[in-house]
Image (tube, helix red, strand yellow):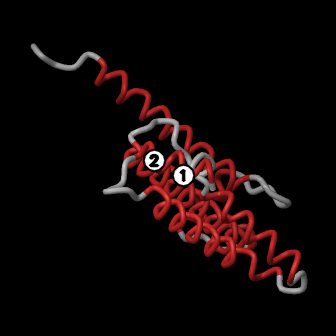
Amino acid sequence: MMGANPGRGRIALVLLLFLMLALVGGIVSMMMGSVEIPLQEILGALAGAGGTHAQILLNIRLPRTLVAALVGIDLALAGTILQAIMKNPLADPHIIGISSGAGLMGILVLLLFPEHSELVTPAAFVGAMGAAVLIYLLAWKNGIQPIRIILAGVAV
């Protein structure tokens, strides 16, 4: 093939390796726990077999593994979008101040309302959004430029 990208095969191989590692990690996370479940029983439970191990797997471990995978995918996408918007491969929520806003609100809730620890997550979300709005407003001057967002985020 003339004009084919020689690095394309290597990229596909690396992606396949990461996919296999993710699958192995998912299987290991379903096998390990306070009750170890053998691989044969995991396959049987996924095929429809019953029993105590199947209940543990289908009600606790499989949902936990799927949620962990989805959270990982979401974090990877959020990081990729942030880096694309900033046009900076090193951009992350810590550099632009969003994590600081979330942490501040979470700590304030713990200090002011220690009996309401269930409010930490929503308060941290509000703090992160408030920091993002503040950073955006500080960075605005005839439009938004990534370098001003980063500088405003470091200042915040």
Near-viewer residue (55 or 64) = 64
Q: Is residue 109 left or right of residue 6?
A: right
Observer-nearest residue: 67 or 95? 95
Q: Residues within 10 Å of mark 2 (few under 14, many from 20)?
A: some
Q: CA distance from mark 1 to mark 2?
A: 6 Å
Amino acid at dot 1 = Ala
Q: Give the class, few, some or many, for how many residues have Cα within 10 Å of label 1's Cα (few <14, many ≥20).
A: many
Q: Is 53 left or right of 92, judged from the image as shown?
A: right
Q: Residue at x 73, y 63 (%)?
A: 103
Residue type of the residue flagged with mark 2? Arg
Tell me the SS state at disc 1: helix
Q: Where the N terminus falls, by quadrant?
A: top left
**Residue at the image point whose x is 55% and y is 46% from the top:** 92
Q: Are marks 1 and 2 in contact (CB under 8 Å)?
A: yes
Secondary-structure class at tag 2: helix
Q: Quadrant of residue 15?
A: top left
Choose between 141 and 67: the one closer to the eye: 141
- The residue drawn where x is 83% and y is 85% is 116
Q: Which residue is mark 2?
A: 148
Query: Going by the image, does 1 lie left or right of 131?
Result: left
Query: Which of the pair 127/135 is nearer the observer?
Result: 135
Quadrant of the snapshot with the C terminus: bottom right
Q: Which residue is mark 1?
A: 152
Looking at the picture, how far across and down is residue 51, in whole percent? Answer: 71, 73
Where does the image place residue 60, in percent across and percent down from the top left?
70, 70
Residue occupying image coordinates x 10% and y 13%: 2
